[in-house]
Image (cartoon, rainbow, N blue to C red):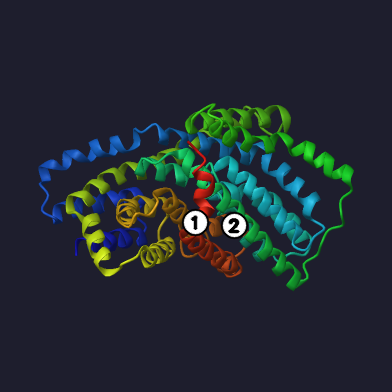
Amino acid sequence: MIMFVIFAAVLGLMLIGVTTAVTMGFASIATFLLAGGDAARLFLVPQRMFAQVSGITLMSIPFFLLMGNLMTVGGVSRSLFGFGRVCLGHRWGGLSNAAIVACVVMAAMSGSAAACAAGIGMIAIAEMTKSGYSRSFSCATIAAGGALGPIIPPSITLILYAGLTQTSVNALFAAGAVPGLLLGIGFMCWSSWVCCRHGYAKTDPAPWSERWQAFKDAFFALMTPVIVIGGMFGGLFTATEAAAVASLYVMILGFFVFKTLTIRDLPTIFWNTVEQTAKVMFVIATAGFFQYVLLYTRIPQQAIAFISTSFSSVAPVLLIIIALLVLMGCFMEGTAILLITVPIFVPLAKSFGYDVVQLGIVMCISLAVGVLTPPVGLNLYVMSSITGEKVMAIARHAVGYVLIMILFAIAVAFIPGLSLGLANLVP
């Protein structure tokens, strides 16, 4: 009963437009009092909120957000798409594939779905439509490519999951690398099939001299993931230090290599980063008290007991988790869903002996579906705001990508080697 009240309250408040952080805060306090909690113990609210955001792991989030904002202004996305275009443009779906490849590389820099979609979308849409691609399909393709941001390391979603579950960030990043790349290849295959079916134009093959020039133009941008991922796995620095170093590197690129970044841009970039960080951290902070309420009401224990007696294996439980996350993603923002469900799903998976790292990748892919599904669908609105295309028109063309993501989430859930094969090599 109490679990139903919590989810009904959260969903109802968010549907009427209350922000995620305020929703979780009000729902937590109301549930605590409804469950018989002493009102005098509400002094725990600020304590729990502070404790939730004071972990060293979460300090990497503002730096990754800063890096994403610097890349959007600093010309990195333009060089990446240009390199992909000259290498792939002459194939069926070449421009769409180039956009997806650029999103993959952007994902390996920023870890944000919206940053990937916005950064590549502003560059690629015009060229794709000029070459005869459907505008709504182009938007859907880049929105799907942006959905790789929370999956491919360094992922802000995986950093949050690591902080909530006390799991190794490096192990989660290693576990997300192969599924993210394979999902990108799946998107490329689907977009090529759609382009071949509709006869979207191919560009003329670029001469090798042009390809070499495009590679030289994109070389320093392509080195950003090497610095972030290679530095972390090589033991040179932590996730937070990697994010700080990469932000400085991208800033230097914008000033001295691409020369599209100016001193006048920095106040706006810094302020946008502060705003984004405050929003994310406020949600995480309120989740601290929400987790306390869940433990107080023994909801995770009750859910484990009920499901353990209802199912004898983990397989149906995993399918239920994926279905719930995809459904909730249609109505709620991914960070909020993660913070609500991790305290329930992780102990539940542990009760069946399921690997927490593998579960993190399954949840990450399932949550990423939400950026492509209305009515919330963040990337749909990002692409709509850039192009003026109707959200539902983009959503219709995104259905194929959504199905691929759901099928891949199921595959990762039942094939441990897809995620844990590389993760097991990380100390």
389 or 208, nearer to the observer: 208
**Residue appearing at x 73%, y 30% in the figure:** 257
> Label 1: few (<14), some or many (≥20) within 10 Å?
many
Q: Are marks 2 and 1 in contact (CB under 8 Å)?
A: yes
Q: Is residue 150 visible?
A: no
Residue 8 x, y percent position in the rendering:
28, 63
103 or 190, nearer to the observer: 190
Q: Amino acid at mark 2?
A: Leu
Q: Quadrant of residue 263?
A: top right
364 or 116, nearer to the observer: 364
Q: Secondary structure at mark 1?
A: helix
| Residue bearing mark 2 | 183
Residue 375, relative to residue 256: is it above or below? Answer: below
Residue 115, relative to residue 16: is it above or below? Answer: above
Q: Is residue 365 left or right of residue 347?
A: right
Residue 151 x, y percent position in the rendering:
52, 50
> Label 2: few (<14), some or many (≥20) within 10 Å?
many
* Residue at the extreme bottom of the image, as rendered: 197
Q: Earlier in the sequence, mark 2 or mark 1?
A: 2
Q: Is residue 84 visible?
A: yes
Estimate the spatial distance between the alpha carbons at disc 2 and disc 1, rounded to whole Å: 10 Å
Residue 220, relative to residue 417: is it above or below? Answer: above
Q: Is residue 19 left or right of residue 393?
A: left
25 or 159, nearer to the observer: 159
| Residue bearing mark 1 | 365
Residue 314, relative to residue 234: is it above or below? Answer: below
Residue 367 x, y percent position in the rendering:
45, 57
Residue 226 x, y percent position in the rendering:
63, 35
Q: Secondary structure at mark 2?
A: helix
Q: Is residue 208 left or right of residue 66?
A: right
Q: Amino acid at mark 1?
A: Ile
